[in-house]
Amino acid sequence: MSTGKAFKVLVTHPEVPQQGIDLLKQNCEVIQLQSVPINRAELLEKIRGVDGVLWAGHEPLNAEALDAAGPQLKSISAMSAGIDFVDVPELKRRKIPLGHTPTVLNTAVADLAVGLLIAASRRFHEGRKKIDNDQWENYHLNWLLGQDIRDSTVGFYGFGGIGQAIAKRLSGFDIDKVLYTTRRRVHKEIEEEYNAKKVDFDTLLADSDFIVIASPLTKDTQGIFNATAFNKMKKSAVLINIARGKIVNQDELYEALKSNRIFSAGLDVTDPEPLSPKDKLLTLDNAVVLPHIGSATNRTRADMSTIAAHNVLRGLAGEPMLSPAY
Ligand SMILES: O=CC(=O)O
């Protein structure tokens, strides 16, 4: 039955916030998947014949899905900042524009990064275990001592919107220096605003008290935080990862933490996700591990759905997307 609407759009997740759905419904017939977790077979069936897709979740977006959709598909937006689950060359080859939703999640992810930085440097996880295990030993003067944030050097591996939002928050903590390693230098005004200096990777590792990973996962960044990198870091260093688990070699991180080669880690992302409850990383006192909840606030997720919907609509209208991924 025709709805009289020009375009048909698939929303790949039943829990996409209503704000995005309502926007799409103004101009499009919207079909929404019903299963959680996403059922690939249902996705491949429902995607057939649609003009646009709001792709929520990290399900692979590849030739199989594009073939199932058909040649009329002209606009896709991920509802995420990272697009490592997308076969970008395949979309480009088919000339399908792709949007994503960076920026709107910067503050939520940055808040969480600061939380992890404090939790990992001040031994929250280990402290909680001491209570659980009836090992409260505060009669020792040096019990559960952590690392100071004030006067520290914070090194960012990746210094885009999220990294900068973290630096902004940390400026209230009286840090001494911001270093960053990126492919391209950020604008001079941004460097000045955060008193940030671009350095090579080895300098970042050697000079930082805190290292925050805030870069996309690419073939160049995959596994770059490995034993060689950990061996170049300060023994007192704290590693924070709010980007993607695969940027870190997790087995080698485990060894570095277990042997106290570095002080601690705060991780919102792991490899794999979900992480098994039996994973050895979870046995460590000096690892604070969260289940990838960086952007998980009501407002952020609603904003992500709105941006993703605008991206899809603009792609359908043949206009540049609000947040194009390429
Ligand atoms: O990890 C979350 C995102 O990429 O949006």
Image: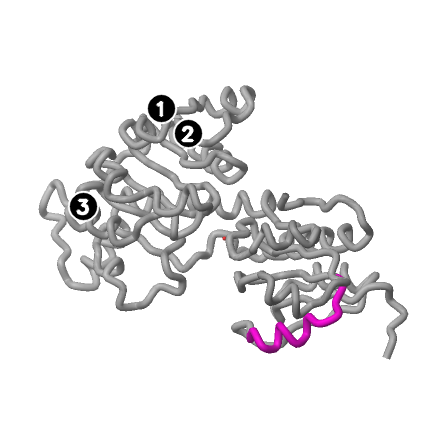
Q: Is residue 229 left or right of residue 187?
A: left
Quarter of image, res 26: bottom right
Vertical relation: 47 (above or below) 322: below
Q: Quadrant of the N terminus?
A: bottom right
Vertical relation: 282 (above or below) 248: below
- Where is residue 50? Give x, y as percent: 74, 67
Q: Is residue 44 magenta?
A: yes
| Residue under label 1 | 176
Front-most of 184 and 141? 184
The amino acid type found where label 2 is placed reads Tyr
Q: Secondary structure at mark 1?
A: loop
Residue placed furthest toward the left:
140
Q: Nearer the viewer, mark 1 or mark 3?
A: 1
Residue ID at (49%, 47%)? 109
| Residue under label 2 | 180
Front-most of 41 and 243? 41
Q: Nearer the viewer, mark 2 or mark 1?
A: 2
Label 1 – label 3 distance at C-alpha: 24 Å
Q: Is residue 259 left or right of residue 220?
A: left
| Residue under label 3 | 144
Q: Secondary structure at mark 3?
A: loop
Residue ID at (61%, 77%)? 42
The amino acid type found where label 3 is placed reads Leu
**Highlighted range, magenta:** 39-51
- Where is residue 293? Give x, y as percent: 46, 56
